[in-house]
Image (tube, rainbow, N blue to C red):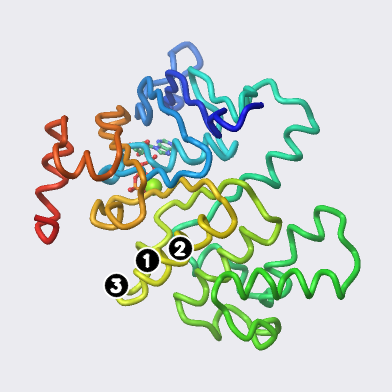
Amino acid sequence: MSPETPVFEVKKLSKVFYARTGLPWRAPAVTATALDQVTLLVNSGEILGLAGESGSGKSTLAEILAQLQSPTQGEVLYRGKSLSTMSHQDRVDFRRQVQMIFQDPYESLNPRHTVLRTVSEGLINSGIRSRPEIVSRVEEALEQAGLRPASTFLDTYPHQLSGGQRQRVSIARAIVLKPAVLIADEPVSMLDVSLRAAILKLLRGLRDKMGLTILYISHDLSTMSYLGDRVAVLYRGQLKELGPTRQVFASPQDAYTRKLLAAVPSLF
Ligand SMILES: Nc1ncnc2c1ncn2[C@@H]1O[C@H](COP(=O)(O)OP(=O)(O)OP(=O)(O)O)[C@@H](O)[C@H]1O
Ligand SMILES: [Mg+2]
C-alpha cells in the first residue's frame, strides 16, 4: 500500500431501506433511499467534513464506512481492500483502526460503568490483561482527550461529569487503541455552544498529533470552516458538492450548497 492509497474509497454507494408489507406475495416497499450512488475518497491524514440537512444520509454513510451497516449497492475499499470481502484478520485490524464517536454523550456511555471501565473496554477486548498497563494507557488517552489530571477521572461515573467531559470520555475511548481513523457523527451537536469549539479544537489537535484521518459529520456548515480540510455535501442521499473547504465556501458549485451556506450568515 503506497502512502497515497486513500483511507476509504467509496464507489457508487447506495442504501435503500425497505418496509415489510406483511403480505408475502407483495414486494417490500422502498421507504427511503438514504444514499444514492455516492462516490468519494477519504484521503489519509485529512479531515473530511460531511454536511447536509437532517435525513440526507450522513449517518448512513458513516455507519457503512464503520461496517455497522451494509450497502444495498456499490462498494467501499478501506486502504485498498473491499469491506465486503475482507479476511478475518483484516476485519480484526479494521475494528481497531477505525473508531466512531457518536452524537449523544449521554446515551453512548453506559451510566453504570466508571470512566476506567468504559475507556479500557477496547484494550481488554484486544487481549491486554495487565492492570498497570491498562490504567496507564487509559490515563494516557484521558490526558490526550483533555481530561486532566487523568487519575481523578478513573473512578467517576457519567452522571458526575458535564456534557463536554462525557464527550471527552467518548473520545478517549475512541483513541485508546491508537486508531488510524475517527468517524465523528455530530460529535458536538448535543453540546452547549460554549463547549463546542473546545471539542473541535481537540479533534483537530488529535489529527495533528496522532496523524489521524477524520470524517467529521455535521449538519452545521459553520463548524466545517474550522475543522474540515475538504467538505462534502449530501442532499437526499446524493453527493452534491465535494472540494477543499475554502473553495466550497468561496464559490459553491451546487445550488443546495449555496442554500446551506446562506443559512450561515456569520461567515459572510
Ligand atoms: N433503519 C432505518 N430504516 C428506515 N429508514 C431509515 C433507517 N435509517 C435511516 N433511514 C432513513 O434514511 C435517510 C437518511 O438517514 P440518516 O440517518 O443517514 O440521515 P442523517 O443525514 O444522518 O440525518 P440527521 O442529521 O437527522 O442525523 C432518512 O430518510 C432516514 O429516515
Ligand atoms: Mg445522523
**Are dots 1 and 2 in contact, CB under 8 Å?**
yes
User: Which residue position holds label 3?
Assistant: 193
Rendered position, 195 above or below 45: below
- Looking at the image, tell me whether mark 3 or mark 2 is earlier in sequence order: 2
Q: Is residue 139 above or below residue 267?
A: below
Task: Kindly report the distance in space between the C-alpha atoms of the residues bearing marks 3 and 2.
Answer: 14 Å
Name the secondary structure under disc 3: helix
Q: The residue under label 2 is which amino acid type? A: Asp
Q: Earlier in the sequence, mark 1 or mark 2?
A: 2
Coordinates of residue 10 in the picture (x, y in percent) = 47, 25
Image coordinates of residue 214 in percent, x first then y, are 49, 48
Count of numbered labels shown in the rendering: 3
Foreground tag (3 vs 1): 3
The residue lying at 11 percent from left, 42 percent from top is: 259
Mark 1 residue type: Met
Which residue does the numbered mark 2 point to in the structure image?
104
Which residue is situated farthest in the top direction here?
25
**Where does label 1 land, which residue?**
190
Horizontal arrangement in the rendering, residue 52 relative to residue 27 (left or right): left
Secondary structure state at the residue bearing disc 1: loop
- Mark 1: give few (<14), some (14-19) or many (20+) Cα within 10 Å: some
Dividing the image into 4 quarters, which one contains the C terminus?
bottom left
Q: Can you tell which quarter of the image residue 48 is in?
A: top left
* Mark pair 3, 1: CA separation: 9 Å
Foreground residue among 173 and 144: 144
Q: Quadrant of residue 150?
A: bottom right
Q: Residue at x 48, y 17 (%)?
A: 73
Disc 2 on helix, strand or loop?
Answer: loop
